[in-house]
Image: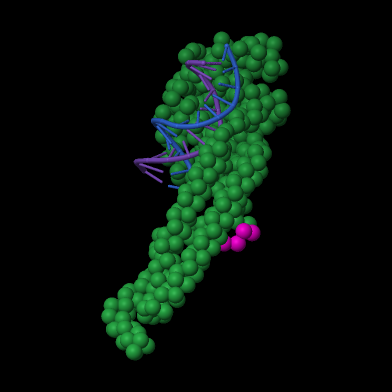
Chain colours: A green, B purple, C blue
DNA sequence: TGGAATGATTAGGA
DNA sequence: TCCTAATCATTCCA
């Protein structure tokens, strides 16, 4: 009687909702769980340990776009160790979770088996019970994954924040950048090649060079007066370096189209601008170059002259002025003759359309005030032939 | 220690 | 993609 009753009960159970419910249990994989899994995999927390942390660190470094600083390796190792810590905690928690899940499932299965002696427990019912337990545990697993992801994100943001810490460029680097800036004041938009050259010379990245020029342009434009003295110093420096090292070139300047004028960027010589040889940007005489002899007297600290090898400011002024007179003649010669500056700029050696646009905007805002001399007279030179 | 200087980041535009 | 302009965050210096 008992077995017969048992089998009938089983049959009834089969026919009722149980079968329906079991079909409903075939749920698709949770998309959120998938996202978390993917993220943990990408961050190197889940999946194979090999290269995970370093790959993520490298990715973070690449994302920041910063240069290679000596501290980078320290920061990377710090990031890696923290990530490894998170990974370790995650895996140990995951292990605990799996263990608990298995233990609980076994426990419930045992209970059901025991109960099956007194009431009908179908295999499907057992399966259903197991899946319910697994679902409950997967919710916990999701929480674990979520908090792990959060931890990684926090670590990452901290790592990137730390990378924001800046170091001032070396004096020499700033000097090089300023030299370029003031010698190309009419168009302070270095080409890609010039940026690379500057970056190499300064020991910084190209993007840092771009940042520097971006900041410099803005700050110069905002406060031209403040930068006037600096501009003068660099103009004289450049003039001196050219006159002292290249008088022969001054007396017989290389035509703008000649080899070497546009192709290579020579910072130390900086002859590009003064010798009627456009630099990489096709620059000719810029505002700063023209301004040089105008505001020399009175505005220069004596130290800047002595450091350049002059005894007095008037000596430097004279030297510079004489030089610019030669320049002026050359300028006229080039602008009138075929293959002069017009040709050169038209050829657009290093001018990109963007640069031309930007240049226009720059000159509109900057050139008038910087070219205008406060002291009109014999020493006053208006030779902005770059326009 | 506060303000200036400066490198980096971000949003929006062309 | 590069630029400007604004802003942030850090470093430097009197």
Q: Nearer the viewer, residue A374 or A125?
A: A125
Image vertical order of residue A249 relative to residue A81, above or below: above
Q: Is residue A340 magenta?
A: no
Q: Residue furthest left?
A: A16
Q: Main secondary structure of the magenta part?
A: loop
Residue A5 x/y as whole percent: 32, 86
Point out the stretch of residues depicted in magenta.
A45-50
Q: Using the rendered view, name the quadrant where residue A28 is placed.
A: bottom left
> Residue A321 appears at what percent x and percent y?
60, 18
Question: Horizontal and vertical percent for residue A19?
Answer: 32, 80
In this view of the protein, can residue A110 be seen by the observer? yes
Q: Is residue A81 left or right of residue A214?
A: right
In the rendered image, the vertical position of residue A217 relative to residue B11, given as above or below: above
Q: What residue is drawn where x is 44% and y is 62%?
A: A138
In front: A381, or A1? Answer: A1
| Residue drawn at the location 60% of the way across and 32% of the way down | A167
- Please tell me which residue lies in front, A330 or A22: A22
Q: How many marks?
A: 0
Residue at point 48% right, 68% down? A107
Question: Which residue appears at 66% of the width and 10% of the height?
Answer: A312
Establish if A296 lies above or below A222: above
Residue A362 horizontal/vertical position (percent): 44, 32
């Amino acid at each position: 009687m008992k077995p017969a009753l048992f089998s009938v009960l089983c049959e009834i159970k089969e026919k009722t909702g149980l079968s329906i419910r079991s079909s409903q249990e075939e749920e698709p994989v949770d998309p959120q769980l998938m996202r978390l899994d993917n993220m943990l995999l990408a961050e190197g927390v889940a999946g194979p340990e090999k290269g995970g942390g370093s790959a993520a660190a490298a990715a973070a470094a690449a994302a920041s776009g910063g240069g290679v600083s000596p501290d980078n390796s320290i920061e990377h190792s710090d990031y890696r160790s923290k990530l490894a810590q998170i990974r370790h905690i995650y895996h140990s928690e995951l292990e605990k979770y799996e263990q608990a899940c298995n233990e609980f499932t076994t426990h419930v299965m045992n209970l059901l088996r025991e109960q099956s002696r007194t009431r009908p427990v179908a295999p499907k019912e057992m399966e259903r019970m197991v899946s319910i337990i697994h679902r409950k545990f997967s919710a916990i697993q999701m929480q674990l994954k979520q908090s792990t992801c959060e931890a990684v994100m926090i670590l990452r943001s901290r790592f990137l924040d730390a990378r924001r810490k800046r170091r001032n460029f070396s004096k020499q680097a700033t000097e090089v950048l300023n030299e370029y800036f003031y010698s190309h004041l009419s168009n302070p938009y270095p080409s890609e090649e010039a940026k690379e050259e500057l970056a190499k010379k300064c020991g910084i990245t190209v993007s840092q060079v771009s940042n520097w020029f971006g900041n410099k342009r803005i700050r110069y434009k905002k406060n031209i007066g403040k930068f006037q003295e600096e501009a003068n110093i660099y103009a004289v420096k450049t003039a001196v370096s050219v006159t002292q090292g290249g008088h022969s070139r001054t007396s017989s300047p290389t035509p703008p189209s000649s080899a070497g004028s546009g192709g290579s960027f020579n910072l130390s010589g900086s002859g590009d601008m003064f010798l009627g040889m456009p630099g990489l940007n096709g620059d000719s005489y810029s505002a700063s170059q023209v301004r040089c002899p105008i505001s020399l007297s009175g505005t220069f600290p004596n130290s800047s002259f002595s450091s350049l090898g002059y005894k007095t400011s008037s000596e430097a002024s004279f030297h510079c002025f004489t030089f610019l007179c030669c320049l002026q003649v050359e300028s006229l010669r080039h602008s009138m003759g075929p293959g002069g500056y017009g040709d050169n700029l038209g050829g657009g050696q290093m001018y990109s359309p963007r640069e031309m646009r930007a240049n226009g905007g720059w000159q509109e805002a900057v050139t008038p005030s910087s070219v205008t001399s406060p002291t009109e007279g014999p020493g006053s030179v208006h030779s902005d032939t770059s326009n």
